[in-house]
């Protein structure tokens, strides 16, 4: 049997002490443990990493988000100072592509104060290399500055811890991590008084308490100060039963119990509950629409054609491939959803329909 990871040994000790561990606690430790957490010590992005995100696939993604931000800036009345905020900025690629695109909008780059919400020291370092010193970091959304804001989040909410409940022998139970006889991690069930309609044996229901809490706080910020938020993530428009928690290591799915701290753990975002939480905070919600709808409406094809015109054949192929990956129906285009939120009273942001 393989030697446990350092984090696994820690978690085994915690479970021995406190009993079975809720999944959100497990997920938070696997991703964010200060020493052994997945994001804390490594750069997981790119071809050599564990997964690749939209901004890492092509600069076009960030440029189109930049155009969206420029329109939001106009809707806010071109404030002379505002916060341009990104939640979970990874390598800083998206922000850097956004800022290149917004150069054409007079007043945007001069007025933007960049704020990044990031817990990982390793990624903060990459972000500062990419974006320079004019950046303020935050551990959480609680310390975001007062005043107008434009907020971006790509694949941020999927990394926040979730809980799972399972319908077993006529009642809902919580799924928790326990120990086998030989001290390996196993997924088990503990009694939990969850009020909910009966379901079929083995049905799974997920909640995201941290996700909801962050969304409520952002909604409250948008209610207090003028601003706009755009969220990209994979997930479903309406709440549904199902186990969406997944682990990925070196571009391959693995068990969530495999090598804790060495795999990325994510879950699909329930956009219905995200909408509810943002609304509870006081924001007005638009969408979700698919990433495909968003990118096509923002002009991904025109932008790709323009880039291709200046490119060599090999590069043209790469551009075409990237465009297909981002917007293709069987690729990220339909799996990923885009939701926007604004302060009450702002115009409907293009390309969303009325709230
Ligand atoms: N937006 C980037 C990275 C997505 S990965 C991209 O598209 O490439 C998730 C990002 O969220 C990482 O930067 C990770 O360090 C950060 N993160 C994860 N959990 C977080 C938390 N609780 N608070 C702040 N940042 C978090």
Image (spheres, helix red, strand yellow):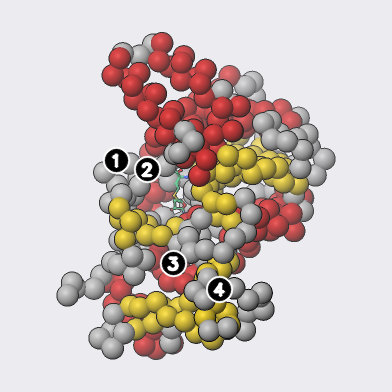
On residue 219, the disc is: none
**Circle 4 SS class:** loop
On residue 200, the disc is: 4
**Circle 2 SS class:** loop
First along the sequence among labels 1 and 4: 1
Q: Nearer the viewer, residue 346 or 41?
A: 346
Q: Distance between the residues labelled 4 and 3?
A: 26 Å
First along the sequence among labels 2 and 1: 1
Q: How far apart are marks 1 and 4 (CA)?
A: 40 Å
First along the sequence among labels 2 and 3: 3
Disc 2 target residue? 52
Q: Nearer the viewer, residue 205 or 38?
A: 205
Residue occupying the far right of the picture = 345
Horizontal and vertical percent position of residue 226:
75, 42
**Circle 1 SS class:** loop
Foreground mark, 4 or 3?
4
Q: Distance between the residues labelled 1 and 3?
A: 24 Å
**Circle 3 SS class:** helix
């Amino acid at each position: 049997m393989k030697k446990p990871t350092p984090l696994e040994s820690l978690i085994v000790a915690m479970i021995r002490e406190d009993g079975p561990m809720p999944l959100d606690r497990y997920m938070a430790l696997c991703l964010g443990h200060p020493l052994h957490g997945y994001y804390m010590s490594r750069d997981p992005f790119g071809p050599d990493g564990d997964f690749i995100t939209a901004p890492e696939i092509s600069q076009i993604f960030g440029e189109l988000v930049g155009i969206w931000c420029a329109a939001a800036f106009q809707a806010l009345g071109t404030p002379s100072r505002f916060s341009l905020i990104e939640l979970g900025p990874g390598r800083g690629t998206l922000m850097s592509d956004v800022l290149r695109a917004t150069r054409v909008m007079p007043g945007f780059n001069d007025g933007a104060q960049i704020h990044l919400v990031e817990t990982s020291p390793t990624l903060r370092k990459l972000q500062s290399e990419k974006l320079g010193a004019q950046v303020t970091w935050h551990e959480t959304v609680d310390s975001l500055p007062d005043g107008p804001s434009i907020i971006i989040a790509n694949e941020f909410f999927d990394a926040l811890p979730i809980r799972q409940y399972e319908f077993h022998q006529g009642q809902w139970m919580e799924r928790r991590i326990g120990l086998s006889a030989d001290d390996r991690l196993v997924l088990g069930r503990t009694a939990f008084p969850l009020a909910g309609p009966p379901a079929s044996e083995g049905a799974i229901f997920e909640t995201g308490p941290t996700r909801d809490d962050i969304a409520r706080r952002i909604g409250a910020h948008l209610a207090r100060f003028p601003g706009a938020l755009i969220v990209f993530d994979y997930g479903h428009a309406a709440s549904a039963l199902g186990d969406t928690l997944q682990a990925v290591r070196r571009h391959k799915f693995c068990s969530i119990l495999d090598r804790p701290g060495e795999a990325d753990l994510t879950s699909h975002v329930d956009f219905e509950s995200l909408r509810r939480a943002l609304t509870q905070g006081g924001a007005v919600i638009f969408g979700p629409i698919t990433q495909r709808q968003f990118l096509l409406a923002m002009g991904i094809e025109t932008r790709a054609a323009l880039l291709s015109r200046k490119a060599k054949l090999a590069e043209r192929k790469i551009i075409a491939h990237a465009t297909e990956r981002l917007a293709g129906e069987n690729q990220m285009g339909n799996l990923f959803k885009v939701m926007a939120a604004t302060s009450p009273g702002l115009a409907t942001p293009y390309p969303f329909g009325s709230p």
